């Protein structure tokens, strides 16, 4: 008989393969539509990427893409872009609030719909009809007259694929597939079993939930029946758990049943309440999450912490029970540190740092992708270890989720809250005064091996990316990847310039390069850089993020900005 640990490893492997399958399908969907400009992390107002009147760069890109696409349809008629008819239709120009149910309600008049794949951040979707004639009616109608989805005009064309890839014939009620695979995109807040249960259970009875963190944050949710799973997919696919972030991308999973061996924040079997989490030797008990309210995230200027998500008006996406509310109220965001029984901490401890290649600035360059950085301090008593004070406990949680265990300059980072048990007893004792005060104190400042100071205050730097609600909403929280998105670069900088920059800093060069088209009046350019490995991309970002680019006769330098791309390859 296998041990619970062995069963958990097999389970994680099975779910990991399902996650990899979904990631592959997303990439294939992106590749099917050529000429699509990348939608990456929000750029500064001076970045020159499709500027608009107070709107984000993402909003403008989506509107520009949709208008150009619509113009192409009207000019070329049914043979738009010379793509042959297909049962799969590519839909563009969707509004932010659209979910799968909205597409079905608007497009089923053209014929039965088999499957829908949402691409929330691109405001696009793939819709597969049961017959090519239905798709033809959809594309033709969209070329002749406006077709509105959730109150906004959408644009249509045939996809180059004849079928949307999916593991099983899950739309057939007799197929027995009642497990959904949820990918949480831009996870600004922590995602737990309690959060997902609160989101999913009002639509259909939830039996089991498993959360795993390999390529970002993903989860599998097992419902009581296939019908419940279908209703949940239609109602929630493309929706935001919290305002402007934690966007749900939902597909049917391969497994037909989940195996849960313990009830905690990352897995829960609601049919077996006795599977209580036991932390051997730690003397801790799991606390009730929904029973405790942390300080409101809006105190930091990020807006309301607990938005409401309206379910589709069509009653077929709801259960018939009178107990199901018309609005789903989500729990307040909570940091992972509160689950462990400790008070939330905005200070992270980072160990495994390279002694000569890492300093305060390079730590900032890497960690600023997940939240504001207040202070960074290396510990003299613990070589290769630093304390990073971030804007709040949510930023610490995001940094832990995405940066813990990654390799930087040949050493594996260990990132955890100062109070967490993942830090050694010695480290905790030496950092006790810091963690107790929830702040980094500038004491025992010394010189690092590279000659820089062991302490630096970043509270007033303009390179923090979460300083306001508008700025924070433009950031797409991504795990490290082999593709970097660069922006805020002067137009005179070429591929050779960027390669030379890598060489001058003894960094690996990129293997593929892509520059986005920009308007003639744009003051800056942006694009993508692909490296041989994720580790190489991490090291380049750590060194070159916020590098000052000076141009001849220029008064002020340009600040090169880097972030991890949503693309897995070019």
Image (cartoon, grey):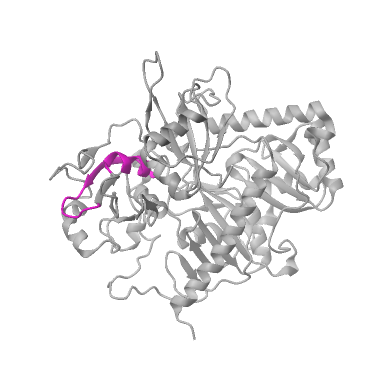
Q: Is residue 243 visible?
A: yes
Q: Using the image, determine if residue 305 lies above or below residue 225.
A: above
Tag count: 0
The residue drawn where x is 58% and y is 21% is: 519
* Foreground pick, 407 / 93: 407
User: Quadrant location of residue 537?
Assistant: top left
The magenta span reads 359-384
Q: Is residue 369 visible?
A: no
Question: Magenta stretch: residue 366 in it?
Answer: yes
Q: Tell me: 107 left or right of 514.
A: right
Q: Position of residue 383 (x, y in %)?
A: 21, 53
* Foreground pick, 533 / 77: 533
* Foreground pick, 333 / 396: 396
Looking at the image, which residue sits at the far left?
Answer: 444
Looking at the image, which residue sits at the far right?
Answer: 133
Question: Magenta stretch: residue 425 in it?
Answer: no
The residue drawn where x is 44% and y is 32% is: 500
Q: Tell me: 82 left or right of 519.
A: right
């Amino acid at each position: 008989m296998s041990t619970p640990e062995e069963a958990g490893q097999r389970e994680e492997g099975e779910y990991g393969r399902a996650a990899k399958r979904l990631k592959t399908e997303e990439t294939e969907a992106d590749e099917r539509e050529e000429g699509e400009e990348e939608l990456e992390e929000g750029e500064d107002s001076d970045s020159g990427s499709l500027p608009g009147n107070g709107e984000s760069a993402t909003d403008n890109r989506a509107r520009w893409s949709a208008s150009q696409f619509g113009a192409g349809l009207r000019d070329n008629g049914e043979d738009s872009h010379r793509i042959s008819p297909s049962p799969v239709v590519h839909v563009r120009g969707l509004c932010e609030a659209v979910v799968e149910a909205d597409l079905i309600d608007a497009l089923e008049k053209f014929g039965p719909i088999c499957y829908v794949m949402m691409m929330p951040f691109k405001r696009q979707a793939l819709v597969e009809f049961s017959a090519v004639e239905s798709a033809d009616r959809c594309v033709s109608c969209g070329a002749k007259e406006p077709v509105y989805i959730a109150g906004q005009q959408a644009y249509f064309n045939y996809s180059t694929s004849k079928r949307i890839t999916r593991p099983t014939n899950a739309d057939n009620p007799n197929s027995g597939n009642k497990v959904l695979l949820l990918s949480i995109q831009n996870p600004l807040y922590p995602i737990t079993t309690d959060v997902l249960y609160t989101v999913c259970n009002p639509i259909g009875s939830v039996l089991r939930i498993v959360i795993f963190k390999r390529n970002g944050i993903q989860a599998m949710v097992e419902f009581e029946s296939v019908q419940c799973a279908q209703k949940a997919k239609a109602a929630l696919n493309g929706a935001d758990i919290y305002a402007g972030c934690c966007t749900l991308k939902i597909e049917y999973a391969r497994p037909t049943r989940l195996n849960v061996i313990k009830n905690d924040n990352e897995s829960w079997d609601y049919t077996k309440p006795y599977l209580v989490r036991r932390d051997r030797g730690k003397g801790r008990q799991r606390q009730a999450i929904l029973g405790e309210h942390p300080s409101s995230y809006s105190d930091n200027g990020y807006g309301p912490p607990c938005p409401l998500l309206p379910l589709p008006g069509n009653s077929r996406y709801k259960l018939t029970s009178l107990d199901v509310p018309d609005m789903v109220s989500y729990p307040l965001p909570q940091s992972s540190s509160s689950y462990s029984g400790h008070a939330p901490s905005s200070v992270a401890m980072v160990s495994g740092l390279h002694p000569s290649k890492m300093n305060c600035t390079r730590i900032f360059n890497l960690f600023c992708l997940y939240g504001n950085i207040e202070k960074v301090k290396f510990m003299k008593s613990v070589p290769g270890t630093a304390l990073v004070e971030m804007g709040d406990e949510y930023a610490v949680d995001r940094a832990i989720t995405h940066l813990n265990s990654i390799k930087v300059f040949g050493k594996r980072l260990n990132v955890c809250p100062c109070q967490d048990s993942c830090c050694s007893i010695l480290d905790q004792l030496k950092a006790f005064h810091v963690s107790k005060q929830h702040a980094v104190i500038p004491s025992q400042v010394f010189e690092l091996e590279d000659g820089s100071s062991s302490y630096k205050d970043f509270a007033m730097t303009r390179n923090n990316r979460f300083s306001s609600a508008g700025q924070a909403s433009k950031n797409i929280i991504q795990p490290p990847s082999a593709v970097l998105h660069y922006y805020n670069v002067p137009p005179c900088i070429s591929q050779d310039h960027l390669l030379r920059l890598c060489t001058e800093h003894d960094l690996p060069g990129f293997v593929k390069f892509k520059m986005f088209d920009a308007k003639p009046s744009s003051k800056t350019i942006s694009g993508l850089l692909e490296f041989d490995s994720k580790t190489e991309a991490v090291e380049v970002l750590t060194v070159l993020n916020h590098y000052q680019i000076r141009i001849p006769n220029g008064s002020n330098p340009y600040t090169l900005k880097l972030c991890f791309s949503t693309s897995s390859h070019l």
